[in-house]
Image (tube, rainbow, N blue to C red):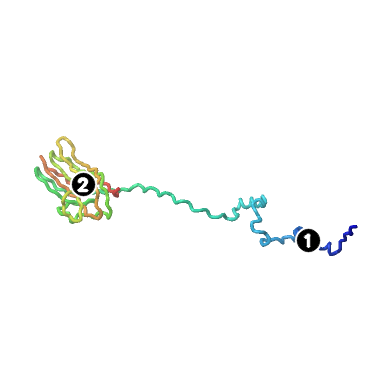
């Protein structure tokens, strides 16, 4: 004979307590939360994911850009250095006046500054100029006189450089040679030659008489300068 099971008040209350502890209480509490009672402290970290955002919230973030900034990316590898730009060049021009004439079979020389206007001089000291403190290349020398030279006459244009004004051999030179039946008024020297840094430089003009008197009167010249490549 089985004894009849009876439920006492204590049994009932303990059963309800277990139910509430296992989840019923949480459900009950969730269903009775007051309005605006859940704040940032009550939301578990990472609980709000992109899937849980409303469409209007996503549109707002896309429109205003007020979403949380992402982690800064790793700095990229430095690019290859670009090539050097084109090398520039400068123009050096000069004009010598009062160049004396030389009769048949005679010759004489005078000096002038390598740039600008100058009257020729027998001494190199007053007309020498200092080159820049950088090695330069001289190219494309052109020399011209205003009048044709007599046959076998000549005008030599010579550029000298050095640490003093003593002359050994010109750095670059060209000669205008008088030839019968032709107009001889110019010469060229393509180069290149290297102009040493911080050097004295000057021009020497030599007039040589041939079958007649060579009387150039004036001499013009020009050349290009550029850094040594």
Q: Which of the numbered marks, if any, corresponds to residue 75?
A: none
Dot 1: element: helix
Dot 2: element: strand
Q: Can you name the residue that lies furthest to the right here?
A: 1
* Mark toward the start of the polypeptide (1 vs 2): 1
* Numbered disc total: 2
| Image coords of residue 57 (percent x, y) | 65, 52
| Image coords of residue 81 (percent x, y) | 40, 49
**Residue density around tag 2, few if under 14, some if 14–19, many if 20 or more, within 10 Å:** many
Figure quadrant of the N terminus: bottom right
The answer to whether marks 1 and 2 mark residues whose Cβ atoms lie closer than 8 Å is no
Q: Which residue is mark 2?
A: 172
**Residue density around tag 1, few if under 14, some if 14–19, many if 20 or more, within 10 Å:** few
Left or right, 206 with reference to 93: left
The quarter holding residue 23 reads bottom right
| Image coords of residue 218 (percent x, y) | 19, 46
Q: Can you name the residue that lies furthest to the top here?
A: 181
In the picture shown, does residue 35 fall above or below 94?
below
Left or right, 181 with reference to 49: left
Q: Can you name the residue that lies furthest to the front here?
A: 1
| Image coords of residue 131 (percent x, y) | 25, 54
- Nearer to us: label 1 or label 2: 1
Query: Closer to the camera, 206 or 62?
Result: 62
In the picture shown, does residue 23 fall above or below 107?
below
Left or right, 22 with reference to 72: right
Query: Closer to the camera, 176 or 26?
Result: 26
Residue occupying image coordinates x 15% and y 37% = 179
Q: Which of the numbered marks, if any, corresponds to residue 18?
A: 1
Q: Can you name the residue that lies furthest to the left here?
A: 105
């Amino acid at each position: 004979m089985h004894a009849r099971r009876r439920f006492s008040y204590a049994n009932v209350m303990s059963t309800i307590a277990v139910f509430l502890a296992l989840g019923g209480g949480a459900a009950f509490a969730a269903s009775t939360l007051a309005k605006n009672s859940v704040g940032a402290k009550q939301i578990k970290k990472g609980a709000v994911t992109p899937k849980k955002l409303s469409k209007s919230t996503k549109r707002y973030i896309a429109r205003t850009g007020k979403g949380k900034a992402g982690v800064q990316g790793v700095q990229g590898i430095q690019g290859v250095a670009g090539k050097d730009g084109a090398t520039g060049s400068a123009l050096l021009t000069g004009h010598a006046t009062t160049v004396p004439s030389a009769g048949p079979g005679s010759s004489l020389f005078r000096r002038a500054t390598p740039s600008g206007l100058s009257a020729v001089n027998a001494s190199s000291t007053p007309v020498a100029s200092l080159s820049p403190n950088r090695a330069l290349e001289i190219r494309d020398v052109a020399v011209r006189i205003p009048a044709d030279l007599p046959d076998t006459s000549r005008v030599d244009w010579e550029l000298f450089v050095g640490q003093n004004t003593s002359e050994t051999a010109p750095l670059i030179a060209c000669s205008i040679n008088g030839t019968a039946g032709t107009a001889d008024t110019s010469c060229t020297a393509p180069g290149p030659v290297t102009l040493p840094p911080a050097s004295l430089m000057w021009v020497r003009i030599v007039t040589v008489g041939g079958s007649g008197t060579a009387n150039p009167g004036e001499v013009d010249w020009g050349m290009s300068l550029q850094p040594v490549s």
